[in-house]
Amino acid sequence: MLQIIRFRSHRAQKKVRIKMKHLKLVFHYSVSNFHYLIGLSLLPAISSRYSTSDLWLMWDGILRLNPQLLVLCSTLLALSTALCFMKRPRPVYLLDFACVKPGVACQCPRERFMKQSVGAGVFTEENLAFQKKILERSGLGQETYFPEALLASSPRPCMEEARKEAEMVMFGAIDDLLAKTGVRPREIGILVVNCSLFNPTPSLSSMVVNRYKLRGNVLSYNLGGMGCSAGLISIDLAKQLLQVHRNSYALVVSMENITLNWYMGNNRSMLVSNCIFRVGGAAILLTNRRSDSRRAKYQLIHTVRTNKGSDARSYGCVFQEEDGAGKVGVALSKDLMALAGEALRTNITTLGPLVLPMSEQLIFFASLVLRKVFKMKRMRPYLPDFKMAFEHFCIHAGGRAVLDTMESNLELSRWHMEPSRMTLYRFGNTSSSSLWYELAYAETKGRMRKGDRTWQIAFGSGFKCNSAVWRALRTINPAEERGPWTDEIHRFPFDVPTVEVVKD
């Protein structure tokens, strides 16, 4: 009997949710088309009172009354319009992008990872079991990539091998990108490379300049220590530079390097990164040339950066340091998810008014007034429905917990989360480049239509939360694209088990 009552209660709640959803949609469309509704309601009144000849006579009377004033006003209007047009930000287009896909020799199944961990001879039995548990619940599949130097029978974590990994990732992505776009290296005026943990001398950006013989006046930048959100920081930096330098191409390279950053100690907060970070990288070509707008894929609409580094807890939640035995690693705080949530709320507070329809902003404002002015403390804060602002979501594949939290907080569907979850499973956490594997997934699935809006969200040390909003300028035909998913997209999506046992 109790089960029947619960079932009926569940059905009643479901019906209420459906009705509320329909009411919300009616409200959204009414507010979004309010000006049309007003215009249509006024049209009968105007047409019944004034004829076309009456309106023409009124205009003729204005011209005869003071033609000089009319000409002056028209001139001022034209000049102000031209001034606004000249002062507005230059549009930034994404011509194309490419993601590196390492060879089969670099593939690292979970069992192989554990074999290498055992062979390293530095981890205790308890911490080997801990790493195995993390792997089983990580959401990573059997085909992620690891540096060859660390997969060797005798691991070689040295500067030479780290450079080889960097060259493989950067040059592989750039070669593919230049082949796609047909842009010559000498045409590139801006170069931004980001890699958080590996910063050799000469810099990674200098390695790119030397390899591709970029011109002598190229504006070259190398960003380090900025974590997994550095890719969007690079995009924002390139956007700002493209506002100043006309008719330019900006090459952005996002990657991470593992060879010298595999933690060889027994601090559990540092062992987590060993288990989820994998080899990957992306190269992105931006331009402000209007002549390239026809062949560009996307236009960059907004970038929003949030930095919580002034707070001590946020600053220290992802921290590179020595453990008690002097081994260097990156420690992840237990407060990481809570702090990421705070950074996200700050970020969307800025982003929301830029992208949300007026209906969602009105509901949010009403909720805020009820809670703050009328002291309705029990009322939960209203989280805007960002599905009304975006068709696609690319959320940094930092780990299963990150994606679960984002799915819940933003009330996204499995379809919206699919690119992020499949990227985590197939390529692992590739740091700042993961967003581009996710966008490539959406393209290869044939999801990207002209006018679609995509929200890229990334979190990084410091602590930072950054966003980028893109609008598709054309429908992407997957048959014409070559990317990391092309040869195997038919295998995706599928349900990733909560636990996948690592065989001994």
Image (cartoon, rainbow, N blue to C red):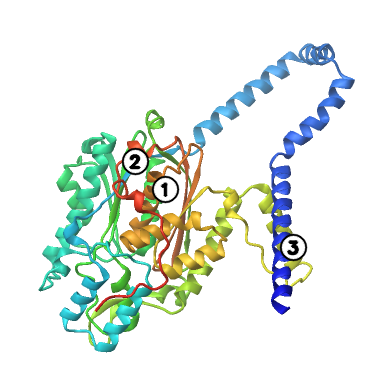
Mark closer to the chain start, 1 or 3: 3
Task: Indicate which label's residue lies in the foreground, 3 or 2.
Answer: 2
Amino acid on which the number 1 mark rests in the picture = Ala
Q: CA distance from mark 1 to mark 3?
A: 39 Å
Q: Secondary structure at mark 2?
A: strand
* Residue 464 appears left or right of 44: left
Sort mark 1 into few (<14), some (14-19) or many (20+) by Cα contacts within 10 Å: many
Q: Disc 1 vs disc 3: Cβ atoms closer than 8 Å?
A: no
Mark closer to the chain start, 1 or 2: 2
Q: Position of residue 238 (x, y in %)?
A: 37, 47
Sort mark 2 into few (<14), some (14-19) or many (20+) by Cα contacts within 10 Å: some
- Read off the residue under disc 3: 369
What residue do we see at 76% from left, 65% from top?
Answer: 370
- Read off the residue under disc 1: 442
What is the residue that sits farthest to the right in this orientation? 49
Q: Position of residue 268 (x, y in %)?
A: 33, 83
Q: Quadrant of residue 163?
A: bottom left
Q: Position of residue 378 (x, y in %)?
A: 73, 74
Q: Secondary structure at mark 1?
A: helix
* Residue 111 appears left or right of 306: left
- Read off the residue under disc 2: 96
Task: Indicate which label's residue lies in the foreground, 1 or 3.
Answer: 1
What residue do we see at 74% from left, 61% from top?
Answer: 16
Mark closer to the chain start, 3 or 2: 2
From the viewer's perspective, is residue 86 above or below residue 25? above
Amino acid on which the number 2 mark rests in the picture = Asp
Q: Secondary structure at mark 3?
A: helix
* Residue 259 appears left or right of 500: left
